[in-house]
Amino acid sequence: MYPIFRLLKGMRKVRGLPAMPATGTHISHHICWWIDIDPWRELNNGRTLTLYDLGRLPYAKRIGMIDAAKRNQWSFAVAGVSVRYRRRVRMGARIEMRTRGLGWDDKFFYIEQAMFLKNGDCANHALIRMAAANAKGIVPSATLAAEMGHHGPSAELPDWVRHWIAADDERPWPPMQDARA
């Protein structure tokens, strides 16, 4: 089940915080609860993505992305994600999540997120590509950025992000056309 009450709590916490630029860093704190774990009593990999939502949506509120979407009746979609898992997150662990925007291209905003454990170790790191959408399809990123008050070009995306974009562009779609049942 989606942790809607945790999301509402996170959104309430950012209500009084100042707005920040799209490339700013939003920090949030979370706990790995019993409903977040797998049979090995550690954070489930699917739930990791859900917890990243709990950091990304308050970040989106602080940068003006959610207000822009409401004004224009847009929705958001995650269009790709890559996660590196490096440390186990055990039940009861306290997590500091850092969320920041890296920039955008013509269609997508690129956001990086990381979970840090109490001892300072980075448990996992995600690169997320997301888009605003309306009934006609994807809203150009420059349009979304302008609605958020940013009228200049995007910050230059880091090399590792551009390499990820290029690698993803080479993946066949639809996938597994040569697979046999």
Image (cartoon, grey):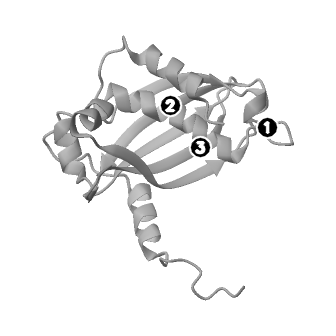
Please name whichever residue, 49 or 166, is drawn nearer the observer in this view of the structure.
Answer: 49
Q: Residues within 10 Å of mark 3 (few under 14, many from 20)?
A: some
Q: Are marks 3 and 2 in contact (CB under 8 Å)?
A: no
Q: Which residue is mark 3?
A: 49
**Image-based side of 119 in relation to 140, left or right:** right
Which circle's residue, 3 or 1, is located before the other in the chain?
1
Please name whichever residue, 151 or 2, is drawn nearer the observer in this view of the structure.
Answer: 2
Q: Quadrant of the C terminus?
A: bottom right
Q: Residue at x 33, y 52 (%)?
A: 157
Q: Amino acid at mark 2?
A: Gly
Q: Which residue is mark 2?
A: 55
Residue 5 percent location from the top left of the image: 58, 22
Can you tell which mark lies on residue 84? none
Spatial separation of the CA atoms under disc 3 and disc 2: 10 Å
Residue 91 percent location from the top left of the image: 79, 29
Q: Quadrant of the N terminus?
A: top right
Please name whichever residue, 119 or 60, is drawn nearer the observer in this view of the structure.
Answer: 60
Q: Amino acid at mark 1?
A: Glu
Q: Which residue is mark 1?
A: 42
